[in-house]
């Protein structure tokens, strides 16, 4: 058995379909070449250790028997719960674990092994590139390798998605899928469909708003709107679904003008759901005026990043316009490779 492994997974950008994808609709997501790396090591002491300087977690240490318990710092949650999810599912690695009527006992005794994790990210956790999902995927992939489980990508998806739901209660899982499979994906809630698109390049400009969005808060706000105006919000989701399905076709045809036009329509509906912001709108309109085919926010909204489908000859002007509105240009290549052992 290997003792240590380094795994990396890409960040992501939502192209179309955010929010609606939480409610059984499709979305389009692309993996970016800025990656999360995790060095994962099996220890002989029953202790869990985590170093994640990018999210201000240093010297974090606890007995394995305390995994998932007590006050867990925000930056440690996903890695810790990912370890717990894996070891609970594969409890043969833990002495003292037992099965009850065929069901794995939740409360396993982690008394014969420990895990040390060191993470390092190419991108800031503020961008909304999915650092929590990427960490979760890296940890589960690494444990699968270290314990020789040979989990398939689909099995990694389900375990990582369970971890995300355990930690934050909500989410479609699209970011997990991007971290595992890479490329550009057509994705339906919970991984019901995960389909790679035949595309190798997207002419994207990415602008960071400088504001960190809280996904769970925004998803809850949209839910409140849906509870109050169920028919109206349902018809917005239905329209977003149509946009996603149409955009998929245009992306595969490299018809960027039409992709851009659909981005503008999707943005209008996101604004209708109440998740845009003055800063995002300013960056979005400036990019359109500077010659982008189309622009929208990417992800939960409220902050994070906006994206602009831009003709190559207008890239510089579009970037300048975004900067003028106080945005920061994040240079990424899309269609990045999925999770891998380094
Ligand atoms: C957040 O990046 C995208 C949302 O659709 C949430 C999700 O799909 O998990 C708002």
Image: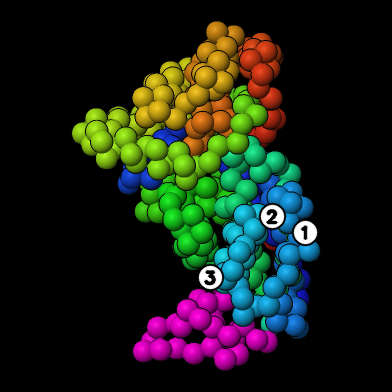
**Residue lying furthest top:** 289
- Front-most of 63 and 335? 63
- Asked if marks 3 and 2 touch (Cβ < 8 Å), the reply is no
Label 3 or label 2, whichever lies nearer to me, is 3
Q: CA distance from mark 3 to mark 2?
A: 19 Å
Q: Which mark is residue 8?
A: 2
Left or right: where 129 falls relative to 121:
left
Find residue 174 and report its horizontal and vertical position in percent: 47, 47
Residue under label 1, please give it: 58
Q: Is residue 97 magenta?
A: yes
Q: How many marks?
A: 3
Badge 3: residue crowd in 10 Å (few <14, some 14–19, many ≥20): many
Q: Which residues are magenta?
A: 86-112
Q: CA distance from mark 3 to mark 1?
A: 22 Å
Left or right: where 232 falls relative to 128:
left
Sequence-wise, which precedes: disc 1 or disc 2? 2
Find residue 272 and report its horizontal and vertical position in percent: 36, 24
Residue under label 3, please give it: 85
């Amino acid at each position: 058995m290997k003792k240590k492994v380094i795994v990396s997974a890409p960040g992501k950008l939502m192209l179309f379909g955010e929010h609606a994808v939480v409610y059984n609709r499709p979305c389009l997501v692309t993996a970016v070449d800025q990656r999360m790396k995790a060095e994962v090591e099996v220890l002989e002491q029953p202790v869990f250790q985590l170093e994640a300087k990018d999210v201000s977690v240093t010297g974090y240490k606890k007995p394995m028997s305390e995994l998932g318990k007590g006050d867990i710092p925000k930056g440690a949650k996903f890695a810790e719960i990912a370890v717990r999810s894996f070891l609970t599912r594969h409890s043969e690695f833990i002495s003292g674990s037992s099965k009850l009527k065929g069901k794995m006992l939740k409360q396993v005794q982690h008394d014969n092994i420990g895990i040390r994790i060191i993470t390092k990210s190419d991108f800031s956790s503020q961008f909304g590139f999915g650092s929590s999902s990427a960490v979760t995927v890296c940890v589960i992939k690494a444990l699968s390798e270290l314990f020789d489980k040979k989990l398939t990508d689909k099995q990694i998806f389900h375990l990582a998605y369970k971890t995300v739901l355990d930690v934050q209660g909500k989410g479609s899982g699209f970011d997990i899928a991007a971290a595992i499979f890479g490329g550009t994906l057509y994705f339906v809630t919970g991984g019901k469909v995960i389909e790679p698109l035949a595309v190798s390049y997207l002419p994207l400009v990415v602008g960071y708003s400088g504001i960190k969005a809280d996904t769970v808060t925004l998803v809850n706000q949209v839910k409140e709107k849906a509870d109050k105006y169920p028919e109206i919000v349902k018809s917005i989701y239905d329209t977003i679904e149509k946009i996603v399905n149409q955009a998929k076709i245009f992306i595969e045809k490299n018809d960027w003008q039409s992709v851009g036009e659909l981005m503008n329509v999707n943005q209008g509906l996101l604004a209708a759901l109440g998740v845009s912001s003055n800063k995002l709108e300013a960056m979005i309109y400036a990019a359109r005026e500077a010659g982008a085919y189309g622009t929208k926010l990417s992800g939960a909204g409220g902050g994070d990043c906006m994206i602009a489908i831009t003709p190559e000859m207008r890239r510089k002007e579009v970037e300048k316009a975004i900067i003028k509105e106080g945005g920061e240009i994040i240079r990424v290549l899309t269609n990045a490779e999925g999770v891998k052992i380094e």
